Image (tube, rainbow, N blue to C red):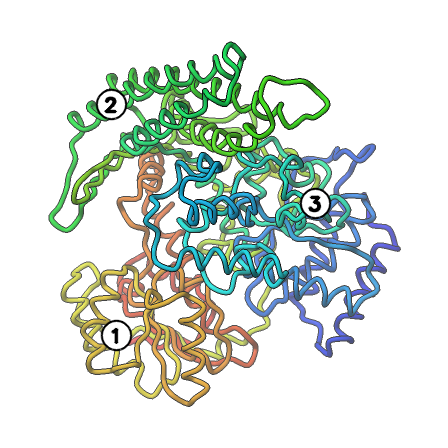
Amino acid sequence: MALSDTVKSDIQQAYRDVLSGKGIRARYGQRLMIAEIARYMGDITASDGERTSAHSSCVVEAGTGTGKTLAYLISAIPVARALGKKLVISTATVALQDQIVHKDLPDLKHHSSLEFTWTLAKGRGRYLCMSRLEGRLQEEGVGDSESMPLFFVDQPRDEEPGTREFFEDMLGRYGSRAWDGDRDHWPSQIPDDIWRQVTTDHRQCTNRHCSYFDSCAFFEARKGLEDADVIVANHDLVLADLALGGGAILPEPENALFIFDEAHHLPGKALNHFAASVPLNSTRQWLKQLSQALSKIPPFLTPGTTAAKTVDKISASAREVDGVLAQVYEEAEKNTDWAFSDERKAAQWRYPEGELPEALAELAQGAQLVTAALVRQLGTLVDELQKAFDEKREHDVDRATAEAWFPMMGGFHARAEDQLRLWVAWCEKTTPGEGKARKRAGPPPARWAIRQRWDHTEDITLYSSPVLADSLLYTRLWSRVYGAILTSATLTALGSFDRLQARAGLPDASRFLVVPSSFRYGEMATVEVPAMAAVPTDNEAFTEELVSRLPALWAGEKATLVLFSSRRQMNAVRDRLAPEYPDLITTQDDMAKGEVLRRHCERIDADRPSVLFGVASFAEGIDLPGRYLSHVVITRLPFSVPDDPIEASLAEWVTRRGGNPFMEITVPDASIKLVQAVGRLLRTEQDTGRVTILDRRIITRRYGQLLLDALPPFRRIIER
């Protein structure tokens, strides 16, 4: 659809209004981004609302200070409304999601004449389930209440002291509307094992049949989804929806424009989403819990009914699955070359080219058959229980029984489905490719096993994962979506979009743009590479030199961030330096991330120096503008861990094709991470500072020049 004069005018006027209303000046890069996105969407052709032009996406790399959120909102909202399409904005982090919903969209609405509505979309597992919270409190207080089956398979009942008070506080805050039931809006971080006890998923939720439906946090948050013009979601929710076929949670891809902010995370998240695993001994324990639960349900069912007969079938299938898992464990334990070390209680084995040993492959096929039967039978029981909620029909199960047992059986069903995914993945032939969407065959799946030892037990967990997400994303998303925009500050690697296009499976007709930054890098900062006697590959000597060199590097600085490639080295350096510099150093593991940053800023505000030690997550996920950060020290080039099974499988495939995995995979990956790390320094046009890189390989190795040239054009100070 060629953009009408009205749409063009709406975009231009909205931009002028926002600039005037907020008292800010136009940015060249921002204007380029607005124009590029508008042109891309205007070039899409359609007939009766269905896209007819070639599949494509619009990819825009826009660095810090561009104002990319405003750029894509101003350009996309008028076009989406003119097309009658939903606009779905997807982020990788909760922080950006909340910023868009609570700051950026309200700002645009306030300062422009654009008419639009918006809502937030998160998965069910981010919200409180009142039914589970009530049952959890009953269990804590009564111990043997009628709702005990709901929590029969939960965590051990010797919770930490204060757990009951915590849940009572949660109930009180939700009841008084002081809290909206969103996990991310709770005032402190809720541990996963605690949160699992009070949330649910689509398999365990009774939806409109629940007695708490009218006050449900999840459904309250979803009320505006159908009517909103703009839906702010996250990558995980988009991928979950695609796994269900698309359109189950979010709008169908064919009827929506998607904007992926923080788009560099999308391929990795897709791999995580479509990966599968089965911990063998833990699953056998789970099967015992299933059998114990099944032994308690017959008194509630009428003999001879479908539900009662199915319970017997499930019990038999569970015993079969348990027997096969025991055989799989014995085979994996005895016939795998596990390599334990004194320092590690875990050993990993990757199956080269995804090929399983013949005996293990045969057992996997048997596990797939019996697990598939278990999934079918649990599904039948869940369906029978669900029928009891339909008051217009007669059914064999009474409603009280269904309310008590449906959530638990739904949970069993979901877990069995997860296990089946692993066996299906392990039994697939290793000839790659999904459908006929891609021109070339991709790598076979990565398959590996990890054996872990604890004081009194051990387990073997089996894994499978795609190595690249290109076919998955192309088939499920790019080939269906009406329009897609991808943006981030780091989408290129070594100056090219090739890495992103290969890993994300972007259509050939996609268009790419790097927006020039408004930062005057050469005037604002330096990148320094001092002389170092030790090299990072000599771990002990390098740690010693870090201990001796770091104090001089942060001397005279108020705010320093030191980034390490491993926690072990970070903690070793901290332990050596902390006695001499008490209260100066804070590591990212000392407390919650938000608290670490808050205390750091408090020290700076009090005119006291502060040094932060961090690893990978601090190299990307923190924002410390102005005087809160003036020096970034990068101890080591951020090369990937060599034993990562997915990366190793990808390297194996590249090698088999005659490529160089180090130059094709490792160096481009390191380049992106390095750019992200140095990106912590300059957050506004007024910031200044310096970056120090202590890894001399950036100037002594051939690939080092590539990494150095991919950084922003800081003034370089290199000691020879």
Which of pointers 2 and 3 indicates the residue nearer the eye?
A: 2
Q: Amino acid at mark 2?
A: Ala
- Where is the C terminus found, in terms of image quarters? bottom left
Residue found at x 64% / y 66%: 29
Q: Earlier in the sequence, mark 2 or mark 1?
A: 2
Report the front residue among 234 and 34.
234
Quadrant in which the N terminus is drawn: top right
Q: Which residue is mark 3?
A: 257
Q: Is residue 460 above or below residue 701?
A: above
Q: What residue is shown with label 1?
A: 720
Q: Is residue 159 left or right of residue 151?
A: left
**Above or below, comparing residue 355 to residue 711 in the picture:** above
Q: Residue at x 20, y 82 (%)?
A: 580
* Proximity of marks 1 and 3: CB atoms separated by less than 8 Å: no
Closer to the camera, 140 or 700? 140
Q: Rounded to the nearest whole Å, what is the CA distance between mark 2 and mark 3?
A: 48 Å
**Residue indicated by mark 2:** 326
Given the image, on which type of amino acid does mark 1 rest? Arg
Q: Amino acid at mark 3?
A: Leu
Residue 137 at least partly seen: yes
